[in-house]
Image (tube, rainbow, N blue to C red):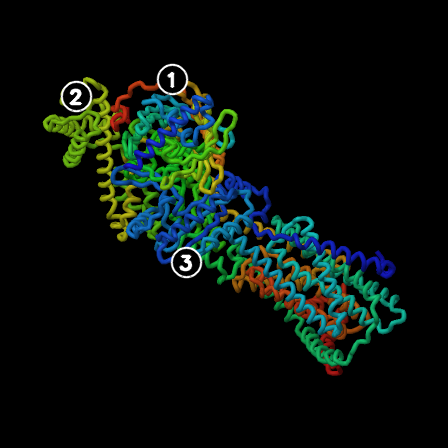
């Protein structure tokens, strides 16, 4: 207990010093530590209290053929999420509800059945995309990874993220490009267990909506399968006060 | 070219010849280091063959169908260390770019039904391999309960686990196979390791070819040296002819390497063959030299004369041998063509070197005196032998000819029983590591040879998927086809998890909903194409016997052509006209019956589908049901509905027991009245009675419970209808199974696994949609209007069909190359002897030889394979020499005015002896191959050895017998032709006297 207090005090002290210093020197970013950059980055991504999104997914195979699907997504905090597929027609109505503690429900309209579903293997790809269940988790990077500042480019920090001890992940490391001005990540390289570059995620069209920074287009490319997923946010509402009712099993079939 | 002129030139440029020969040998010898070996069976086939094209196409789409398999065996594969090793190997395989897909216990999709829902993931989490023995035991039990794993990734007894890698089609199978083996060897533990599948077979084969070459070439050289020393008794007698064959072998191999053409399993025999066969030319040259040249002075002129004299016979003998080998050019199989061309080239080189380099070298050497004493003694002994033989032939000419005819007739009959073997595994000895691995996999894991069916069609169409399931059931019912797997199985598996029965969902939406789970999963890459328009059914064949494999290929082909329904009309059963109803029900009954039949046959049992009572039961069941709900079913339903209404997740929360009681009572009444019951199950109105339920709910549920959410009633009604339908369906199926049971083979009545198969087979009685082939539809309904259709097509591919193709090609090669060789030799001899009859007679001994060879192969079950197929033409090429030598000598002797016996005796004494010696030495050369490790090569070795003896014997017996019996004019006027029968007796006495005089 004492230790924690001590570190907290120390942290604030250091932080204070930094703020003073940055005020004096007027070059705040240049002196941020890797951890601070990652914290800020997490803060920016997870800023809204709730989100109401309409998403277009484009799956692109190695021959360049595209498949399109649409979904709506409601998210409250970073642990409640309801995803519903709107297209293609034969998958319309399929819905996912994820609740805290890895509890997930699925509704299949063809059978009018709700089933609890679990996947203990997080590297399973989600619905034909290049995003795995792990990629879809809304866990803060700083909780899973230890950052290290590799270098500074003109407008970006380049961080290397290595999993914290005991964290189960499919990646041996991430390399992340973070914008200096708003701390939004624009590119994340994912390395597999053999330390080979495996997937690249790129955020484009980073805009400010309702005071929050949001990337309206993500792209995840799997270098091994040469498959790509483009995720486009068609419509976005923040902080619309979504009620907990929307995140119940009953609501899955609606 | 005139021979005299030729020898003139050879002597004139003798220094240049020696120099050039040495330089060429050095240059080509340098390239020997780059020689490679190609053991890929597929590459031997013509690459534009449609079967090969399809095979490659499928390989590109779904990963190569030559699987590389690693098996780990221990007491119980479910232990932490073994599973960790499996994972380690799997991971390292996956990192190889040339590998398309890897499957193992630690990396395979698992769709699991749990107490609370379902779980999709991997069978074993590679990051969390269990250590706890109880957990491992559970895992083992689960794995052995699933068709997807059992017999596929884990043996029935849980002792052997398999890692299956599918290579990319364009991958260098040999190189990647070697790297895979390194990975496995780098992860060795206590388990016994087996390597199976084509890539590993190729490695073993390549290594064997290499080590055999390294061992056999020196052996055959030693042997030839021994034979040479025996006959010449001098160092030069050993080394000069030997240098000719060695130089020519180096030239050919260097040339092959220079052209970057890899050696094949057949060309493996070439160096041995060249050494054994090619030495003859050098021997002829040298013995002529020994015969003619005994003094130093005038040596050059003497060599020139010897060369002019012996040059022509050498060329003629070489030419016929060339013909034998060049006949292989007619083959469609590249390995046979290459073998033919390069061996012919080697023979040509040996021939050329023997008449250029050899005399050139001799001209620089001192003349030696040869000892003759021992030779004379030998002569006496062998001369007596030959005389005896001559007498025998003369006395029994007709008998010999008659005997030949019997042998020929018998052979023609036996040839039909000749077996063929194209399976690569047959190349290895029974006790070899790879053969044992293969046998283990065959016995315990269903084999290593994949048979594949490509299905084209809309794979999200339930009826296409249902046809795939039918196909798989058919496959499994065949002996030695195991574990068919496809996307349809995965869909069934998921349906089982969601709905409790292992069937294809009825609707497209249902399929799509289940598909959603596995979308993007790696396993799909090897099951379907991205656009879901092509899929693969993959099964394993558990036999390496070519005959059985080919029978299976034909079975499958028959199913595709005759039984597979490729054009279906989809019908909503409740909407078909009543006169068509019965036909449709009959069709559905047949479909269900055939599935049950296959499921029974798969278990090695037989029953009859022609029981009229059974058919009646199924026919009734397959008819659209309009029956009411019995009381016990209604009671069960009331329980379920009441459970639902009490549940937290219900669309309307009804807490009052009174309300619930009222609702379920009303539902019960409604169903009993059969009004909504009819609508719910298979009714004419497809609205499933939801409105009735909404009405009941409205009547009973207090309004305040749904004022805020008026749609809640509709959602609740929807769920209740689903519950009712489910219960009704299950009850119908359970009853039907009870009704069918008395007709089943007794051992299956309590077989859980079979009963669940049966449940899946009959499940379709509940379905509202049915399909009937378009042809039947137009006949029965009289309706030709376009309907909702499901179309598909199927093609068979995989190693078995390639083997089938190879088998056909081998047959063709054999027939073609052999006929061509015999025809050419016949033409050459007929031309040379200026007699058609002469051509016929002189080809008879070799034809006889080949027939006897085939008969022996048939009797002892020695199959024709990619190497033994060469024997026929090789035997023609080499064996015909004996005939030529014999006939020419006999003709010469006879022309000198000798009697038949005298001519025969003289020919046998001289040429005959030479023929025997030559045949024996060639035979010894080929017998060396028996010491090798490649089975077809061993067969080739002893069979060629045998044909050499037979053909030599035939030349010395059958040939003269034929000449005597036919009185063939081309030999010259034979004495008996005019004197008739009386003088024939006199001739015989004369012959006896003659013999005594000697």
The chain letter for the residue carrying disc 3 is B
Q: Residue at x 69, y 50 (%)?
A: B258
Nearer to the camera, B991 or B226: B226
**Badge nearest the viewer, 1 or 3:** 1
Residue marked by disc 3: B190
- Quarter occupied by residue B4: bottom right
Q: Is residue B312 visible?
A: no
Q: Estimate the x, y position of residue A81 in percent, counting from the top left.
A: 32, 27
Helix, strand or loop status at disc 3:
loop
Report the residue that reaches farthest toward the left.
B658
Residue B673 is situated, as x and y percent measured from the top left of the image, at 15, 28
- Number of other residues with Cα within 10 Å of mark 2, as a class: few under 14, some 14 to 19, many 20 or more: some
Q: Are marks 1 and 3 in contact (CB under 8 Å)?
A: no
Relative to A30, B645 lies left or right: left
Quarter holding residue B870: bottom right
B591 or B985: nearer the viewer: B591
Residue denoted by label 1: A211
- Indicate the position of residue B247 as horizontal and vertical percent values: 73, 60
Above or below residue B914? Residue A197 is above
**Relative side of B754 to B382, left or right:** left
Classify mark 3: residues with Cα within 10 Å, few (<14), some (14-19) or many (20+). Answer: few
Q: Residue at x 83, y 57 (%)?
A: B16
Tell me: B860 left or right of B673: right
Query: Label 1: chain?
Result: A
Mark number, residue B790: none
Q: Nearer the viewer, mark 1 or mark 2?
A: 1
Q: Is residue B415 left or right of residue A104?
A: right
Report the residue marked by disc 2. Answer: B705
Give the Cα separation between the discs numbered 1 and 2. 40 Å
Q: Are marks 1 and 2 on the same chain?
A: no
């Amino acid at each position: 207990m004492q230790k924690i207090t001590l570190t907290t005090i120390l942290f604030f002290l250091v932080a204070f010093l930094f703020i003073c210093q940055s005020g004096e020197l007027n070059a705040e970013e240049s002196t941020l530590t890797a951890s601070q950059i990652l914290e800020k980055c997490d803060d920016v991504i997870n800023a809204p209290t709730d989100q109401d999104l309409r998403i277009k997914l484009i799956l692109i195979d190695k021959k360049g053929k595209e498949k399109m699907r649409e979904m709506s997504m409601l998210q409250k905090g970073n642990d409640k999420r309801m995803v519903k597929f709107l297209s293609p027609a034969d998958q319309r109505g399929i819905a996912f509800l994820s609740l805290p503690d890895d509890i997930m429900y699925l509704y299949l309209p063809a059978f009018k059945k709700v089933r609890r579903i679990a996947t203990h293997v997080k590297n399973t790809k989600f619905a034909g995309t290049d995003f795995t269940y792990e990629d879809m988790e809304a866990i803060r990077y700083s909780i899973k990874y230890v950052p290290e500042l590799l270098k500074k480019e003109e407008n970006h920090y380049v961080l290397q993220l290595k999993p914290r001890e005991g964290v189960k992940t499919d990646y041996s490391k991430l390399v992340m490009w973070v914008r200096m001005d708003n701390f939004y990540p624009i590119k994340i390289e994912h390395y597999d267990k053999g330390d080979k570059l495996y997937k690249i995620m790129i955020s484009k069209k980073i805009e400010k909506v309702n005071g929050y920074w949001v990337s309206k287009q993500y792209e995840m490319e799997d270098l091994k399968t040469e498959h790509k997923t483009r995720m486009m946010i068609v419509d976005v509402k923040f902080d619309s006060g979504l009620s907990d009712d929307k995140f119940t099993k009953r609501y899955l079939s609606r | 070219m005139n021979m005299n002129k030729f020898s003139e030139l050879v002597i004139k440029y003798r220094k240049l010849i020696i120099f050039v020969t040495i330089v060429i040998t050095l240059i080509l010898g340098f390239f020997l280091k780059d020689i490679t070996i190609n053991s890929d069976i597929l590459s031997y086939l013509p690459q534009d063959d449609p079967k090969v094209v399809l095979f490659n196409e499928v390989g590109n789409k779904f990963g190569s169908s030559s699987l590389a398999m690693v098996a780990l065996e221990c007491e119980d594969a479910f232990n932490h260390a073994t599973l960790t090793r499996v994972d380690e190997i799997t991971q390292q395989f996956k990192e190889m770019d040339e590998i398309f897909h890897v499957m193992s216990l630690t990396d395979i999709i698992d769709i699991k039904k749990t107490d609370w829902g379902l779980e999709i993931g991997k069978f074993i989490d590679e990051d969390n391999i269990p250590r706890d023995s109880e957990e491992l035991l559970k895992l083992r039990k689960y794995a052995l309960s699933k068709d997807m794993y059992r017999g596929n990734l884990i043996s029935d007894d849980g002792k052997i686990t398999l890692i299956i890698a599918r290579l990319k089609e364009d991958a260098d199978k040999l190189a990647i196979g070697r790297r895979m083996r390194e990975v496995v060897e780098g992860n060795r533990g206590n388990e016994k390791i087996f390597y199976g599948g084509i890539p590993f077979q190729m490695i073993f084969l390549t290594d064997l070819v290499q080590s055999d070459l390294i061992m056999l070439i020196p052996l055959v050289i030693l042997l030839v040296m021994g034979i040479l020393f025996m006959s010449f008794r001098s160092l030069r007698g050993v080394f000069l002819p030997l240098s000719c064959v060695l130089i020519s072998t180096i030239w050919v191999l260097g040339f092959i390497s220079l052209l970057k053409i890899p050696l094949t399993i057949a060309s493996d025999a070439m160096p041995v063959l060249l050494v054994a066969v090619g030495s003859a030319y050098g021997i002829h040259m040298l013995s002529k030299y020994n015969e003619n040249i005994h003094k130093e002075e005038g040596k050059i002129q003497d060599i020139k004369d010897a060369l002019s004299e012996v040059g022509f016979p050498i060329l003629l003998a070489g030419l016929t041998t060339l013909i034998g080998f060049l006949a292989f050019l007619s083959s469609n199989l590249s390995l046979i063509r290459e073998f033919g061309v390069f061996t012919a080239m080697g023979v040509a080189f040996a021939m050329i070197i023997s008449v250029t380099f050899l005399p050139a070298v001799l001209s620089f050497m001192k003349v030696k005196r040869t000892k003759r004493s021992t030779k004379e003694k030998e002569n006496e002994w062998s001369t007596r032998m030959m005389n005896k033989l001559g007498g025998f032939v003369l006395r029994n000419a007709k008998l010999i000819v008659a005997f030949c005819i019997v042998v020929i007739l018998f052979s023609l009959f036996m040839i039909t029983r000749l077996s063929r073997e194209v399976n690569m595994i047959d190349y290895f000895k029974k006790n070899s590591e790879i053969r044992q691995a293969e046998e283990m996999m065959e016995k315990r894991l269903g084999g290593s040879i994949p048979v594949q069916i490509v299905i084209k069609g809309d794979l999200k169409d339930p009826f296409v998927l249902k046809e795939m399931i039918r196909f798989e059931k058919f496959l499994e019912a065949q002996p030695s086809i195991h574990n068919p797997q496809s996307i349809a199985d995965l869909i069934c598996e998921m349906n089982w998890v969601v709905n409790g029965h292992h069937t294809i969902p009825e609707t497209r939406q249902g399929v799509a909903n289940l598909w959603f789970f596995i979308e993007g999963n790696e396993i799909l890459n090897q099951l379907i194409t991205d656009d879901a328009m092509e899929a693969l059914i993959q099964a394993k064949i558990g036999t390496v016997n070519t005959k059985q494999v080919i029978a299976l290929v034909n079975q499958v082909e028959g199913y595709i052509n005759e039984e597979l329904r490729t054009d279906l009309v989809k019908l909503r059963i409740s909407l078909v006209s009543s006169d068509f109803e019965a036909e449709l029900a009959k069709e559905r009954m047949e479909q269900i019956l055939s599935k049950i039949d296959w499921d029974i046959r798969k278990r090695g049992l037989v029953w009859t589908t022609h029981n009229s009572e059974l058919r009646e039961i199924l026919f009734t069941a397959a008819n659209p049901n309009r029956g009411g709900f019995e009381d016990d079913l209604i009671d069960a339903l009331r329980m379920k509905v009441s459970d639902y209404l009490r549940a937290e997740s219900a669309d309307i929360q009804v807490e009052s027991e009174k309300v619930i009681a009222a609702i379920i009572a009303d539902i019960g009444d409604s169903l009993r009245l059969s009004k909504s019951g009819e609508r719910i199950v298979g009714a004419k109105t497809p609205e499933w009675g939801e409105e009735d339920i909404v009405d009941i709910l409205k009547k009973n549920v207090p309004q305040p419970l749904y004022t805020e959410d008026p749609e809640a009633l509709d959602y609740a009604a929807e769920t209740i209808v689903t519950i009712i339908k489910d219960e009704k369906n299950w009850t119908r199926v359970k009853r039907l199974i009870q009704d069918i049971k008395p007709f089943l083979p007794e051992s299956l009545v309590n077989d859980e696994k079979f009963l669940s198969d049966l449940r899946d087979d009959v499940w379709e009685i509940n379905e509202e949609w049915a399909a009937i082939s378009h042809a039947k539809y137009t006949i029965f309904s009289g309706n030709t209007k376009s309907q909702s259709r499901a179309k598909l097509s199927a093609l068979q591919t995989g190693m078995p069909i390639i083997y089938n193709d190879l088998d056909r090609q081998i047959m063709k090669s054999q027939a073609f190359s052999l006929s061509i060789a015999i025809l050419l030799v016949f033409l050459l001899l007929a031309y040379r002897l200026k007699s058609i009859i002469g051509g016929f007679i002189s080809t008879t001994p070799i034809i006889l030889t080949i027939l006897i060879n085939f008969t022996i192969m048939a009797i002892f079950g020695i199959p024709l394979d990619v190497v033994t197929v060469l024997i026929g033409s090789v035997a023609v090429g080499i064996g015909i020499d004996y005939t030529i030598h014999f006939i020419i000598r006999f003709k010469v002797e006879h022309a000198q005015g000798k009697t038949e016996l005298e001519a025969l005796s003289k020919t046998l004494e001289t040429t005959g002896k030479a023929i025997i010696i030559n045949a024996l030495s060639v035979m010894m050369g080929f017998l060396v191959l028996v010491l090798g490790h490649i089975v077809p090569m061993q067969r080739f070795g002893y069979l060629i050895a045998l044909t050499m003896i037979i053909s030599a014997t035939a030349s010395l017996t059958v040939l003269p017998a034929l000449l005597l019996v036919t009185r063939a004019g081309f030999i010259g006027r034979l004495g008996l032709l005019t004197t008739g029968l009386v003088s024939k007796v006199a001739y015989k006495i004369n012959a006896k006297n003659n013999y005594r005089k000697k």
